[in-house]
Amino acid sequence: MRAQMQRQGLGYDWDREIATTDVAYYCWTQWIFLQLYNSWYDRTADAARPIAELVHKLENDVLLVDPEGEIASRSALPEAIGGVTPGLTKWHELTREQQRAVIDNQRLAYIDEVPVNWCPALGTVLANEEVTNEGRSERGNHPVYRRPLRQWMMRITKYADRLERDLALVEWPEPIKLMQRNWIGRSEGAEVDFEVAGAEDEVIRVYTTRPDTLFGATYMVLAPEHELVGLVTTDTQRSAVRAYVEQALHKTDLDRTADTKEKTGVFTGGYAINPVNGERIPIWIADYVLMGYGTGAIMAVPAHDTRDLEFARKFDLPIVEVVQPPVGVDWRGYVGDGVAVNSGEFNGLTTPEFKKRITEWLEAQGLGKGAVNYKLRDWLFSRQRYWGEPFPIVHDAATGDVYPLDASELPVELPAIADYRPQAGDDPEAPPAPPLGRATEWVNVRGYVTDGGSVITIKPASRGGPGQAAPGGVEVREFRRELNTMPQWAGSCWYYLRYLDNANDRKLVAPEIERYWMLPAKGDRRQAAGGGVDLYVGGAEHAVLHLLYARFWHKVLFDLGHVSTPEPFGRLVNQGYIQAYAYQDARGMYVPVDDVDERSEGKDAKYIRKSTGEELTRGLGKMGKSLKNAVAPDDICHQYGTDTLRAYEMYMGPLEASKPWSTRDIIGLHRFCQQVWRRFVAEDGSLKVTNEPPDEPLRRLLHKTIKRVTSDMENLRFNTAIAALIELNNALKADRPARQIAEPFVLLLSPIAPHLTEELWQRLRGDAWTHSVSAEAWPAYDEALTVEAEVEVPVQVNGKVRSRITLPADAAKDETQLHEAALADEKIARELAGKTVRKVVCIPGRMVNIVAS
RNA sequence: GCCGAAGUGGCGGAAUUGGCAGACGCGCGGGAUUCAAAAUCCCGUCCCCGCAAGGGGGUGAGGGUUCGAUUCCCUCCUUCGGCACCA
């Protein structure tokens, strides 16, 4: 890899080389994890803050705990009387366990039970894409179970709003921003409480983006996993409900959502009260409602929601119109804005007005409140594999309590073990046994808890010497290390920061170095307000996951003062894929490209397997081993040289576009490189360049070329930059080139073909040569020379070009002169004979269009 | 199903803000050079009619706006990418 990059003359600074798997690197990944673990999201500050601040505020009763265990601000509650706030609890009134739970519930890194695709036979959790439609593992075809497991999670959802908002600060392609916005999926609506009929103190909370359709809610649907399913289910329905829940739980997300458009569901037998009109509406469960979004329960408005309508039709539930669509549109299934009907006192309101009014009304009645929801979910951060960063976390062997290791304990190195594979089993209920569990000496440690709440381990006595002693007066306890490891994403979330200061063993990155590279330079108009990496080139497949995770971590580091910019990547470009033709035989097997012959062209082209004479079909796909269509860059370098390969790759098309590799086309760039050499160097090795000044047209062409290449390079349009250089080269063909052309030409070509131009530069400069062509100043151009002295202007009659007139550039810029010259043209005069000129449109310097009839 | 992007010669692609469609390269045809070939160089090459001059058509399809549309708007088709019943 390294040799390949060097062979291609890539300007990579090897002094900054990093590998995310090196201990010296992942030490800091673990350090960042500790930052996340030891932080919480302070709504008031709208930023992450050290968890110690939270504890301090709770201890001093600045913050209190609400009945749901959430943090509540005391000053925000006007009804606080004499220091006692109804419904809220003071810190010292909580037990130690409760306090721990409250804190853990705020940490940005936390453990939670989440449903995952558990494959006991592989001993690991699978991604949705690794599970087949039949609910089996893609690898090995083992059964996969959907089951809740204790997993490390990252509270990225706390940053949903900022991740969306700050997209305004970065210079990224609009489609990528849009994809992130859709992934974050902010929606505004309301949470509404529906009482359960017959159990008035229980409410089902729903989230809706259409509170204006509350009067049209004719039934409710709970997710099968919803906690109130048991409560609302009547005895007669219990077995049916249980069966449905059972079946839904065994389905993977794919099963639950893919292919089958048919809605399924079961009536629970229970009823809820619609808070706006007091009507009893049936409660159903259905797997089209997901526990992970909103509140896991919906009010169904079949008249104005497509899925609800489908469900209602299938199960024969009532459909009531509450939004009147424009005239001529059927109200059934109408989801747009309209005018309220059948909605009591709200009749006649437009949809946006209604939303505002009903939300206020719900809040006044204590039935609900406006709410913002996100599709974004917290980030599942554990893996049960060996190859990953160990968590800097230990569990108290006696109580199971979680403790972070002290920063002085870093790095936590991966222990050497004999067998890296996760432990397989066949019991779907058995707890996972990650491979790290085999390193028993590594897993079981002794240590003590510091005042700050972190754990410091004590080295046991060993062959090397006596064991460490704990400081006097501390209680030494047994701990077990966390067995999960971090995902691949962890290391790649912040590597751009480590490049800045890769050898620093005291800090992630030194602050002054970080500021030098990441903060926008003063007056740099191209640097976006968010700062960060000047240009980040990556594939579009990272549009949401990697780029959101990295932005999230960066923002946490920003909040905690470790980095100075709110965004990691100021400017982003998605490069396209290099595709290549892939050939398949009649059985669908791929045939290596070098065994294929192409006969004739276009639509009747035939692709023949050379070794067998068999006819093949051709497709286009990402270059790679599996399609047997890979081309090794080394081979191209050997055959044509590195400069040719570089030039070809840049010339193929725009950077952002995917384009097919075509070995056949390389020859063109090879010829260009050869021509350039021979343009300046004779057969005998002598220089062909003269010191005579070039003629006027050539000088103008040179300055035009410098201008084109300069702007193309800035905009990463390498393909058109090369085209401009080829044109200049073609114009030089006639005679011995002038030095005044040759030198800037070589400079312009140098980023594309550095090796060729380096040598040319040395020869051109001769004794005056001082340093590498890559260190020379970029050529400047004279704006006055970038325009032609004379211009040819097309003259159209009724939009069709009928003639061309040539006139001095100044005259072409003058509308009157243009006008006169056009009408004076012989061909135009002939064209206009017998017609009346209605209008003459003159575009200075560009064209003339005469409208006549 | 939803969201996004793209469709231009035989091929890859170019065309600034709505102003000469096809730059540049490949391929192909013809020629020069050569004993011959490779390599190299020159000329031609969007399609149709025409010996030519010239004429007509043409940027996925259909419509619209405009003096003028590859470019802007609407409808549809195809391809690629992302997401998966998101309330």
Image: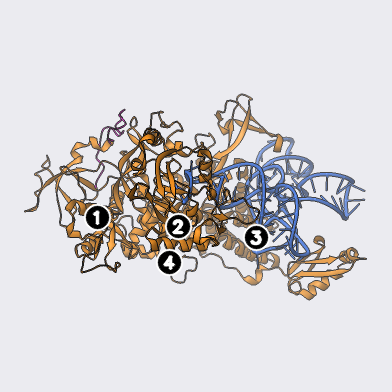
- Marks 2 & 3 on one chain: yes
What span is in magenta?
A: A412-433
At x 86%, y 69%, the residue is A837
Residue that mark 4 sits on: A520
Alpha carbon distance from label 2 to label 1: 29 Å
Amino acid type at mark 1: Ile
Alpha carbon distance from label 3 to label 4: 42 Å
Residue A783 in sight here: yes
Q: Chain of mark 4?
A: A
Secondary structure beneath dot 2 equals strand
Q: Chain of mark 1?
A: A
Q: Nearer the viewer, residue A651 or A307?
A: A307
Residue that mark 2 sits on: A189
The nearer-to-camera label among 2 and 1 is 2
Amino acid type at mark 3: Pro
Q: Colour of chain B?
A: blue
Is residue A539 rendered to the left or right of residue A400? right
Occupied quadrant, residue A81: bottom left
Q: Residue furthest right?
A: A834
**Residue A704 at what x, y percent from top left?**
64, 64
Q: Quadrant where the C terminus of chain A lies? A: bottom right
Q: Residue furthest left?
A: A472
Amino acid type at mark 4: Pro
Residue that mark 1 sits on: A103
Amino acid type at mark 2: Gly
Lower sequence index among marks 3 and 4? 4
